[in-house]
């Protein structure tokens, strides 16, 4: 990478370079190296070098476009920076109200305002291997993979956080992206979900240990007893939900929902009909299975 950066076959835009100049006073024609970043060792207070990402011009263009949209909805760079600092303070406040999660970087002045590193403080788990197993399973639950109990019962993934691995070589079990784009309520929800996922994963690991001693637990019964939905109705339901989701996402781009209501009347009517259809399908589901428990896992399964 260093050879390509110092002797590229064609010009590379500065913002796409993977290596930084050894001499900051010569950013254009100075020697480039990957040894100065981008990994930061908070304990040693130094950059450890390496390459974290590669770039695509299309991704760079899309990022620039979305940053401009974010500026319209959130504010200037100064406003986003202030929001980043506010989000970091909110995390510090949240962490003080519980004992399971702690900030990996002990010195508050060295904690990032864009990324927060978290570690688990669980006195019940002292074995590093068991700890790593629980954390790994919790990340499956935070993502879309989910976790499976020894009795075969599967808890679908929450799909709330997919990219929570700590930086290589950095302390901690989870990495939380905060920054100025995030709403404070989203940050708090992420922390709650991390705690929940860890505790659910801990249950699975305990069950795995008990299963080795021939201690078993019965799997919950099927949550849905209704007959399978026909393919045409399933497609209609999926299309209706996608239409509603698209409308809500479009509305979220505006600071006021009233602006979204300026949409054509026929679109409003179509969304309304889709909403009625989805509601009627779930009423039918409850009517055909009066004893069924409709929970998160059943709705996710129906969606798939």
Image (cartoon, rainbow, N blue to C red):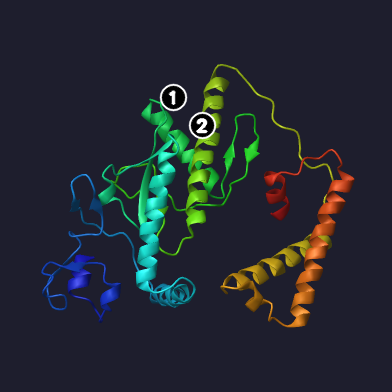
Q: Position of residue 176 (x, y in %)?
A: 41, 51
Q: Which mark is residue 202?
A: 2
Between 144 and 197, the one nearer to me in the picture = 197
Q: Which residue is mark 1?
A: 124
Between 72 and 214, the one nearer to me in the picture = 72
Q: Residue at x 85, y 58 (%)?
A: 280
- Left or right of 134: which side holds 44? left
Q: Position of residue 244 (x, y in %)?
A: 71, 67
* Tag count: 2
Between 206 and 81, the one nearer to me in the picture = 81
Pointer 2 and pointer 1: residues touching (CB < 8 Å)?
Answer: yes
Give the vertical position of 148 relative to 207 (above or below): below
Of circles 2 and 1, the one toward us is 1
Q: Which mark is residue 199?
A: none
Q: Residue at x 41, y 42 (%)?
A: 95
Mark 2 → mark 1, Cα distance in angstroms: 10 Å
- Left or right of 186: which side holds 262? right
User: Label 1 crowding class (10 Å Cα cut-off): few <14, some 14-19, many 20+?
Assistant: few
First of labels 2, 1 by sequence position: 1
Badge 2 marks a residue whose secondary structure is: helix
């Amino acid at each position: 990478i260093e050879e390509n950066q110092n002797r590229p076959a064609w010009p590379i835009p500065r913002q796409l370079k993977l290596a930084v100049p050894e001499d900051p006073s010569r950013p254009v024609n100075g020697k480039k190296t990957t040894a100065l970043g981008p990994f930061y060792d908070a304990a040693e207070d130094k950059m450890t070098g390496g390459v974290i990402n590669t770039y695509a011009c299309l991704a760079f263009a899309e990022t620039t476009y979305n940053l401009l949209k974010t500026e319209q909805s959130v504010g200037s760079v100064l406003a986003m920076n202030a929001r980043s600092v506010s989000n970091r303070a909110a995390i510090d406040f949240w962490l003080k109200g519980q004992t399971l999660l702690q900030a990996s970087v002990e010195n508050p002045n060295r904690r990032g305002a864009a990324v927060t590193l978290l570690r688990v403080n669980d006195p019940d788990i002292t074995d590093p291997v068991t700890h790593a197993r629980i954390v790994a399973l919790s990340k499956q639950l935070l993502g879309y993979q989910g976790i499976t109990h020894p009795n075969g019962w599967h808890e679908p993934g929450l799909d709330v956080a997919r990219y929570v691995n700590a930086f290589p070589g950095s302390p901690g079990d989870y990495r939380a992206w905060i920054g100025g784009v995030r709403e404070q309520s989203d940050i708090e929800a992420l922390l709650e979900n991390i705690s929940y996922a860890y505790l659910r994963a801990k249950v699975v690991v305990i069950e795995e240990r008990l299963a080795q001693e021939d201690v078993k637990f019965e799997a919950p019964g099927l949550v849905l007893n209704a007959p399978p939905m026909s393919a045409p109705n399933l497609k209609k339901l999926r299309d209706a939900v996608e239409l509603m989701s698209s409308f809500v996402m479009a509305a979220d781009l505006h600071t006021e929902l009233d602006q979204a209501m300026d949409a054509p009347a026929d679109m409003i009517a179509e969304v309304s009909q889709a909403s009625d259809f989805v509601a009627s399908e779930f009423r039918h589901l409850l009517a055909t299975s009066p004893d069924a428990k409709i929970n998160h896992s059943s709705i996710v399964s129906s969606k798939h």
